[in-house]
Amino acid sequence: MSTADFLRARSPEAKAAREAVILAAAARLATARGVREVTMTAIADEVGMHKSAMLRYFETREDIFLRLAGTAWRDWSAEIRSRLGAVTPCTGADGQQWDRSARSIADALAGTLVARPLFCDLLAHTPLSLERNVSTDTVRTFKKGAIAEVAGIGDALCAITPLDAGQARAVVTTATSMAGALWQMAAPGTRLRAFYETDPELSHSVVDVEPRLSDVLSALLTGYAARAEARTEARTEAGTEARTEARAEEGAG
């Protein structure tokens, strides 16, 4: 697409179409090279327009990638909520059924994240740089969207586990935070990864993201479930004691 083509984007519909082209180009480049390697100039070259003209559509490079991150959050949220809806509910933290449920949930969270390499990359760069070179309105829009998706996934977790809302949201934020961090450590498709793989003394540095993330989330789910069950038991015992005391007082009276 030529620069002249972009200059003819006058209507809101045409502007939205141009933005979609720019976002798609940025996604292609970031998937192939990694987010950190993609510049505004590279994106402009990919779509065939001058870098200065890009500012008519996005305020900065970070604005482009933050928009992609918002879309990635919504897409992942829709899939993982669908996957969680297929898990058999287990509201107790004891026994083999819970062990199977916790592992199934952890595998679903880890698997759906790792299946989205660009999202994992964006998750790491969002707090490091993407939120730091855009307007506060842009950050607010992104944050509100991400928070809403975390809450939605948390609700889906609460429906099938003994976790409370705060614990469920913490599982989601841990999953996404660790997915971003582990993805950077794994450095897939880079010279660094190849270096690790060819040097026996550094082989421990090769990170297999999905099983590592699943193990961590399974342990977190189990710990939170045990804590939630302990609180429930404590409340039940307290209620029983209160009723016993009330009956004793009535009898004494």
Image (cartoon, rainbow, N blue to C red):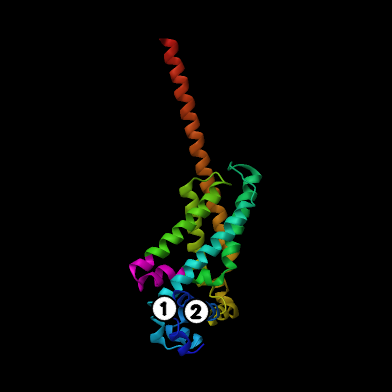
Is residue 9 positioned above or below 148 on the image?
below
Residue 75 visible to the viewer: yes
* Residue at the image position 52 percent from the left and 63 percent from the top: 74
Give the main secondary structure, helix, strand or loop, of the magenta stretch: helix
Q: Measuring from the top left, give residue 171's x and y in whole percent.
A: 50, 54
Task: Identify the image quadrant of the C terminus.
Answer: top left
Q: Measuring from the top left, give residue 240's x and y in whole percent.
A: 49, 25
Could you tell me if the residues under marks 1 and 2 are in contact, i.e. CB atoms within 8 Å? no
Residue 19: give its label. none
The type of residue carrying mark 1 is Tyr
Reading the image, the residue beneath label 1 is 57
* Of the image marks 1 and 2, the number of the one nearer the N terminus: 2
* Residue at the image position 65 percent from the left and 50 percent from the top: 100
Magenta span has 103?
no
The residue stretch that appears in magenta: 124-139
Is residue 111 positioned above or below 189 on the image?
above
* Residue at the image position 55 percent from the left and 50 percent from the top: 157
Q: Nearer the viewer, residue 150 or 222?
A: 150
- Element assignment for label 1: loop
Residue 26: give its label. 2
